[in-house]
Image (cartoon, grey):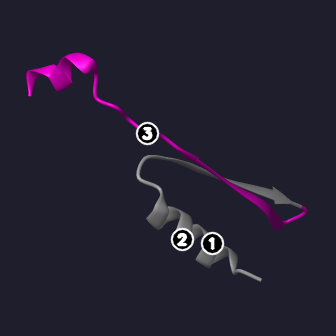
Amino acid sequence: MVAISDAIALIQKQTGYGSVEISVHDGRVTQIERREKVRFESKTNQLKK
């Protein structure tokens, strides 16, 4: 079984931009969700290069 602190550290390393949500039920961590944002440059910015 993975330790919660190890799981959070791994998510932190793997996520560039986004958020982490930790769900707790009866004082225990029951779920960890990761939402990652991927940003793209606009087409006009790409044409200027």
Residue position marked by numbered label 3 in the rendering: 38
Residue 24 x, y percent position in the rendering: 80, 58
Q: Which residue is at 84% across, 66% downward?
A: 27
Q: CA distance from mark 2 to mark 1?
A: 5 Å
Mark before the other along the chain sequence, 3 or 1: 1
> Looking at the image, which residue is at 43% across and 39% down?
38
Please identify the residue farthest to the top as the structure is shown. Answer: 44
Which residue occupies the extreme right position in the image?
A: 26
3 vs 1, front mark: 3
Residue 33 horizontal side relative to residue 12, left or right: right
Label 1, residues with CA under 10 Å away: few <14, some 14-19, many ≥20: few
| Amino acid type, label 3 | Val
Q: Give the residue drawn at x 48%, y 62%.
A: 14
- The dot on residue 10 is 2
Verify CB contact (< 8 Å) between mark 2 and mark 1: yes
Most foreground residue, 42 or 30: 42
Which mark is drawn over residue 7?
A: 1
Q: Give the residue type at disc 2.
A: Leu
* Residue 2, quarter of the rendered image: bottom right
Q: Is residue 37 magenta?
A: yes
Q: Quadrant of the N terminus?
A: bottom right
Helix, strand or loop for disc 3: loop
Please tell me whether mark 1 sits on a helix, a strand or a loop.
helix
